[in-house]
């Protein structure tokens, strides 16, 4: 599959690994893919990101992602659903952090031995890469570009898609920013 990735898409994947290493994460997640994608410049996806105002709201998105990590990866929808049946995540979080310290529900940090090894991709991150292939095939593109990764990040349920949607980047808005009303590429492929 990686032979179909453009140079830019490969840079997103390797950048995600770098983000995971900096965060001392055990594995590469969807969040790392998003952060790496936001780092990219001069691509169709970076123009869409800028057009949607995400570049200016990166700090807000990073805060929302950090808050979701603090909640143990629960999305806002998950939190609302649990509240609907009487489970107060804020109260649970306060109790857990009171006993175990702030960030106790966040993903565990890697140990020194783990940091020296290659970081695996989580199932969610692998799913994003697979979705990007399906999106590219659905558009009849012969390559997988950064724009396909961006669409894949918005396409499914999860924290990253929720954070993007909260910031105005849904599948529909990203597709419009990339391809316009007719669904065709604004730039020559």
Image (tube, rainbow, N blue to C red):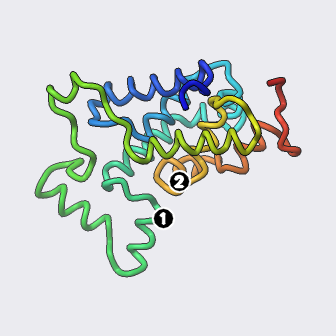
Residue beneath the point at 15% across and 57% down: 98
The extreme left residue here reads 99
- Judged from the image, the secondary structure of the residue bearing numbered disc 1 is helix
Q: Residue 152: horizontal and vertical position, in percent?
A: 59, 44
- Judged from the image, the secondary structure of the residue bearing numbered disc 2 is helix
Q: Residue 158: horizontal and vertical position, in percent?
A: 48, 54
Residue beneath the point at 22% across and 43% down: 108
Q: In which image quadrant can residue 87 be found?
A: bottom left
Disc with the residue nearer the chain's start (1 vs 2)? 1
Q: Residue 128: horizontal and vertical position, in percent?
A: 52, 43
Q: Residues within 10 Å of mark 1 (few under 14, many from 20)?
A: few
Residue beneath the point at 48% across and 32% down: 35
As rendered, which of 166 and 141 lies closer to the eye? 141
The extreme right residue here reads 182
The image shows residue 123, relative to residue 28, as above or below, that is below
As rendered, which of 99 and 7 lies closer to the eye? 7
Circles 1, 2 touching at the beta carbon (< 8 Å) = yes
The image shows residue 114, relative to residue 152, as above or below, that is above
The quarter of the picture where the N terminus appears is: top right
Q: In which image quadrant can residue 91 be found?
A: bottom left
Q: How many marks?
A: 2
The quarter of the picture where the C terminus appears is: top right
Which residue, given by chain and number where applicable, does mark 2 sit on?
162
51 left or right of 150? right
> Mark 1 and mark 2: span between their CA atoms?
8 Å
Q: Residues within 10 Å of mark 2 (few under 14, many from 20)?
A: many
Residue beneath the point at 82% across and 26% down: 187
Which residue, given by chain and number where applicable, does mark 1 sit on?
77
149 left or right of 184? left
Q: Which mark is residue 156?
A: none
């Amino acid at each position: 599959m990686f032979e179909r990735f453009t140079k830019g898409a490969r840079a997103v994947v390797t950048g995600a690994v770098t983000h995971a290493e900096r965060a001392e994460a055990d594995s590469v997640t969807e969040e790392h893919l998003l952060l790496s994608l936001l780092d990219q410049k001069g691509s169709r996806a970076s123009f869409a990101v800028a057009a949607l105002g995400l570049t200016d709201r990166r700090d807000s998105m990073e805060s929302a992602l950090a808050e979701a990590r603090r909640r143990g990866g629960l999305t806002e929808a998950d939190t609302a659903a649990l509240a609907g049946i009487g489970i107060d995540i804020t109260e649970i979080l306060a109790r857990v952090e009171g006993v175990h310290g702030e960030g106790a529900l966040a993903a565990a940090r890697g140990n020194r031995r783990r940091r020296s090894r290659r970081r695996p991709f989580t199932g969610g991150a692998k799913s994003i890469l697979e979705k990007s292939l399906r999106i590219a095939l659905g558009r009849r593109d012969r390559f997988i570009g950064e724009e396909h990764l961006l669409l894949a990040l918005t396409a499914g349920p999860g924290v990253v898609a929720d954070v993007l949607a909260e910031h105005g980047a849904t599948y529909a808005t990203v597709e419009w920013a990339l391809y316009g009303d007719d669904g065709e590429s604004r730039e020559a492929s």
